[in-house]
Image: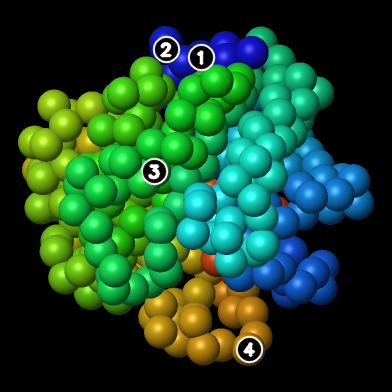
Amino acid sequence: MCKYRTALPQLADRLFLMDGGLETTLVFHEGIDLPFFAAADQLKDAAGTERLRRYYDRYARLAAEASLGFVLDSPNWRSNPDWGEKMGLSRAELEDINRRGVALMEEVRARHEHENAPMVVSGVVGPRGDGYRTDGAMSAAEARDYHGWQVGIYATTGADMVAAYTLNYVEEAIGIVQAAQHAGLPVAISFTLETDGRLPSGQTLKDAIFQTDAATGSAPAYYLINCAHPNHFAHVLEPAEDWTGRLRGLRANASRRSHAELDAAPDLDAGDPVELGQLYRGLRARLPQFTILGGCCGTDHRHVEQIRFACTGVAAAA
């Protein structure tokens, strides 16, 4: 059941948490061989689904015990037709995996949500290609038609919204927003940034937000930044500029490594959870509209615990 599709509670001025780096947790902490770095592969059987259930339960408890909101992003970042084909899935099997991802989020919500801890179910969309490279870029119309298939599935589930992560060029973002508009779903757009604070396409974050809003009538509910370390982008965020007010979410990497270095790295750089929490606190001091907070590559529950502590003063339970 979609509880919040017509009024997303994270748009109010209260703190919402998100999970950390799902894929890096599965690969490096749990030793799972994820085909094509696709966490949705775990939804194919009961053991994998239980592994995901435990993962999300841990984060949902972090929010619930502190009476904070939580956004349950489904594990479907690589559940579009191109990645499904690489995984050997038929279109029907891929549709089922998208539905299972949302259903699992609804199940976690039913266990942990309470009056002071609203939990939003978000159907996740990822880039058609590699999140770090812009080769094979689509026009906005092509992106709308391509991603419309997955977004349309979410519209028939209990998902409250769609969230698109690790987008590296603006036309794909515009197409996803248009697909969500057609499906009647609220949508959040998250761009990834290089070490210079620009999109991998070379465009500034400011221009990417302006262009997306101009092409869609400012349809995105909000924007996020993900898969970059705060040191890579803090310098481009100017509190006095109107466009930064469109940014409400942050899923940063634990590592200061560039995308190229992360792609080639055989190990996990988990950084320093305490330091990351303090960096989030510093960003929120300058930009208090950052109220939807989680992690990306290299982060796990320790980082989100420290983010929670740094931003609320609520320490982790023993």
| Residue 71, image x, y percentages | 56, 33
The residue carrying mark 3 is 147
Alpha carbons under labels 2 and 4: distance apart:
43 Å
Alpha carbons under labels 1 and 2: distance apart:
5 Å
Q: Amino acid at mark 1?
A: Tyr
Q: Residues within 10 Å of mark 4 (few under 14, many from 20)?
A: few
Q: Amino acid at mark 4?
A: Pro
As helix, strand or loop, the secondary structure at mark 1 comes to loop
* Looking at the image, residue 54 lies above or below residue 177: below
Q: Residues within 10 Å of mark 1 (few under 14, many from 20)?
A: some
- Does the residue at mark 4 contact the one at mark 3 (Cβ under 8 Å)? no
Query: Residue at point 42% right, 10% down?
Result: 6
The residue carrying mark 4 is 266
Query: Residue at point 14% right, 61% down?
Result: 204
The numbered mark, 4 or 3, whose residue comes first in the sequence reads 3
* Looking at the image, residue 97 lies above or below residue 279: above
- Does the residue at mark 2 contact the one at mark 4 (Cβ under 8 Å)? no
Alpha carbons under labels 1 and 3: distance apart:
22 Å
As helix, strand or loop, the secondary structure at mark 2 comes to loop
The residue carrying mark 1 is 4
Q: Which mark identifies residue 7?
A: 2
Q: Nearer the viewer, residue 216 or 272?
A: 216
The numbered mark, 4 or 1, whose residue comes first in the sequence reads 1
| Residue 241, image x, y percentages | 9, 43
The numbered mark, 2 or 4, whose residue comes first in the sequence reads 2
Q: Amino acid at mark 3?
A: His
Q: Residues within 10 Å of mark 2 (few under 14, many from 20)?
A: few
